[in-house]
């Protein structure tokens, strides 16, 4: 619990990403940072503003996050050092110190492919996005995008309609849904996938957050497919990030009369793989296979006394987290963290109405 407090406090300070925190941890224990005065923090390399934020404002952000996590069993906080933090995202230059997840947290470690494109696609572009997403999910891929209007939304819908899994990375806190017209889509994604954000739950959408969001979409994924994009668009930024991260870039060509295809044509000229059907992506199957991402990591957990006491109160009938907290004489926040550890260990499962015990076969 103390470690999660520390990571949340660090995550509340702009510029303290996962890599920066790892560097600080080479000189001093992260938990010790919270007890240092602002002047000493500056000596360790933090700016004056960062030091002041960590000393005087981080506590309120920590409280906000823990309250959010305790609200429902499907809301999770995954710090940088957690076994379930996405390994591919960790390899990127500026990974978030903390991820907020609503939905199926185990999807973080699944093999994902990003799909991005225009917010104002042609009817053909919409159809192509849905078809590619559906066919990729049938091959076991998780479709990852940003839930924006246009190609993003069509990609999520294509995956869901095919019975597949999809992940949406948001440019705001998870109490919000933006654009508001995607509220129903967000609900569907939570039920059959996950919403992810680096922003604290109450943070509202801002224009500058969406380009930042794109680095996570790409960072989670082994490859990025651009369906339609103008020459000057955020989708090309995502494609460039994918190339910088040494990930595969795929582009769907179109008519030279279609301005929305110009960005894809440019990417193909720069070396992106031309995609005319899903087989063109699957030919690069070695990119997605044998990378240790197809299945969730096995996590061996030796239960301590409190965890065992909590686990003993979980049975075959759903039991809410607040009831478990009362029975185990623990706070709801502590119960939520322990339940997440038990869930990742395959000992319990979140279901409507609370948690049930998983029986080994």
Image (spheres, rainbow, N blue to C red):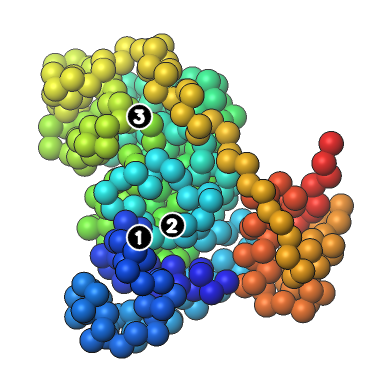
Q: Nearer the viewer, residue 63 or 39?
A: 39
Coordinates of residue 43 in the picture (x, y in percent): 21, 79
Q: Residue at x 51, y 68 (%)?
A: 4
Q: Circle 2 — which element?
A: loop
> Mark on residue 223?
3
Looking at the picture, tell me which residue is in the foreground, 212 or 80.
Answer: 80
Measured in 3D between alpha carbons, the distance from the residue under mark 3 to the one under mark 2, in whole angstroms, is 22 Å
Contact flag, marks 1 and 2 (Cβ < 8 Å):
yes
Q: CA distance from mark 1 to mark 3?
A: 26 Å
Report helix, strand or loop for mark 3: strand
Q: Residues within 10 Å of mark 1 (few under 14, many from 20)?
A: some
Residue bearing mark 1 = 22
Q: Determine the residue positioned at 77% across, 69% down.
A: 305
Residue 283 quadrant: top left
Instruction: Tell me: residue 334, above or below residue 113.
Output: below
In the rendered structure, find residue 80 and report the number of the disc placed on it.
2
For the N terminus, which image quadrant? bottom right
Please state which of the two labelled residues, at mark 1 or mark 3, is closer to the viewer.
1
| SS for callout 1 | helix
Could you tell me how far apart the alpha carbons at marks 1 and 2 are, in whole angstroms?
9 Å
* Rendering quarter of residue 15: bottom left
Dot placed on the residue nearer the N-terminal end, 1 or 2: 1
Q: Position of residue 307 (x, y in %)?
A: 74, 65
Q: Is residue 120 visible?
A: no
State which mark lies toward you, 1 or 2.
Answer: 1
Q: Is residue 127 above or below residue 144?
A: above
Q: Could you tell which of marks 1 and 3 lies nearer the N-terminus?
A: 1
Q: Choose mark 3 or mark 2, whichever is in front.
A: 2
């Amino acid at each position: 619990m103390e470690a999660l407090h520390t990571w949340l406090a660090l995550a509340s300070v702009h510029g303290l990403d996962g890599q920066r925190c790892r560097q600080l941890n080479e000189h001093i224990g992260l938990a010790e940072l919270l007890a240092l005065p602002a002047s000493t923090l500056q000596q360790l390399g933090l700016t004056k503003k960062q030091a002041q934020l960590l000393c005087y404002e981080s506590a309120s952000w920590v409280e906000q996050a823990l309250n959010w996590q305790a609200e429902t069993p499907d809301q999770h906080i995954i710090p940088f050092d957690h076994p379930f933090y996405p390994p591919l995202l960790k390899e990127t230059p500026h990974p978030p110190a903390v991820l907020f997840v609503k939905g199926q947290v185990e999807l973080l470690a699944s093999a994902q492919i990003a799909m991005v494109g225009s917010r104002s696609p042609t009817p053909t572009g919409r159809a192509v996005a849905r078809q590619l997403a559906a066919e990729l999910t049938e091959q076991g891929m998780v479709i990852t995008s940003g839930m924006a209007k246009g190609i993003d939304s069509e990609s999520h819908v294509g995956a869901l309609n095919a019975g597949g899994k999809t992940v949406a990375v948001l440019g705001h806190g998870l109490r919000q849904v933006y654009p508001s017209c995607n509220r129903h889509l967000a609900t569907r994604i939570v039920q059959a996938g996950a919403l992810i954000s680096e922003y604290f739950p109450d943070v509202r959408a801002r224009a500058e957050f969406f380009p930042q969001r794109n680095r996570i979409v790409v960072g989670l994924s082994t490859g990025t497919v651009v369906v339609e994009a103008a020459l000057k668009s955020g989708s090309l930024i995502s494609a460039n990030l994918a190339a910088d991260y040494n990930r595969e870039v795929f582009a769907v060509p179109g008519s030279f009369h279609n301005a929305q295809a110009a960005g894809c044509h440019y990417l193909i000229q720069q070396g992106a793989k031309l995609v005319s059907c899903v087989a063109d992506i699957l030919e690069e199957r070695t990119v997605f296979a044998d990378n240790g991402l197809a299945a969730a990591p096995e996590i061996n957990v030796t239960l301590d006394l409190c965890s065992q006491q909590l686990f003993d109160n979980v049975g075959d009938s759903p039991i809410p987290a607040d009831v478990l907290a009362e029975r185990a004489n623990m706070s709801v926040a502590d119960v939520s963290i322990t339940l997440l550890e038990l869930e990742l260990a395959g000992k319990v499962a979140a279901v409507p109405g609370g948690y049930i015990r998983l029986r080994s076969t």
